[in-house]
Image: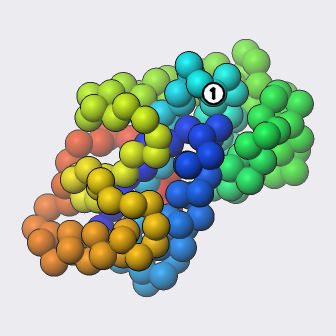
Amino acid sequence: MVIVEYADFECPYCARAAGILHELVDASDGQVRHVFRHFPVFSMHPFALTAALAAEVAGAHGRFWEMHDLLFANQDRLADKYLMAFARGLGIDADLVVGDPAQPYGDAVEADYADGAEQRVQGTPTIFIDGERYRGRLELGPLRTAVARAGAARSTEDGADRRRRRMPWARG
């Protein structure tokens, strides 16, 4: 079972969803995988793109989920100086996560954003369970119910994996 989440590191609803999704995956005994997709809402969140780039840089150093958790836990501190401090705390060269050195990671963020737009994602968080958009409440109980329903109806082909070539940020 694959849950694909389109999220923005500056979105408070995404921060709340992050903990819920983490708990859902941890309690699934390996049956649920959470795939994170960047969908920075530039018009409302001025630091969302730089945070996404920092997360991608961290991912290139094997620390995506640690940076993911730091960014959501510190949404009021996403300016460059904080991103650099988070990187240092993770053992990553701080100069890599901001400015020109982070720009090559923009292609990954753009690819996620474009894929989300193609799937008619308009806001964050947007969740897909095995390729089907989840429209329920972002609470653990309703998500567990939706996952169980999707599992019961699941075919042998993984609907979420069919659409995506890039799936590096999967947990679970």
From the viewer's perspective, tell me whether residue 53 is left or right of residue 27: right
Spot occupied by residue 149 in the image (x, y as percentages of width and height): 20, 74
* Residues packed near mark 1 inside 10 Å, few (<14), some (14 to 19) or many (20 plus): few
Q: Residue at coordinates 25% horizontally, 59% vertically from top-left?
A: 130
* Residue 111 versus residue 7 in the image, above or below: above
From the viewer's perspective, tell me whether residue 152 is left or right of residue 84: left
Spot occupied by residue 14 in the image (x, y as percentages of width and height): 55, 49
Of residues 116 and 161, the one drawn nearer to the viewer in this rendering: 116
From the viewer's perspective, tell me whether residue 8 is left or right of residue 156: right
Q: Residue at coordinates 36% horizontally, 71% vertically from top-left?
A: 142
**Secondary structure under the numbered disc 1 in the rendered image:** loop
* Residue 108 versus residue 20 in the image, above or below: above
Q: Residue at coordinates 20% horizontally, 60% vertically from top-left?
A: 158
Of residues 135 and 77, the one drawn nearer to the viewer in this rendering: 135
Examine the image and state in which quarter residue 60 appears.
top right
Spot occupied by residue 16 in the image (x, y as percentages of width and height): 59, 57
- The residue indicated by pointer 1 is 45
Label tally: 1
From the viewer's perspective, tell me whether residue 72 is left or right of residue 149: right
| Amino acid, disc 1 | His
Residue lying farthest to the top in this orientation: 100
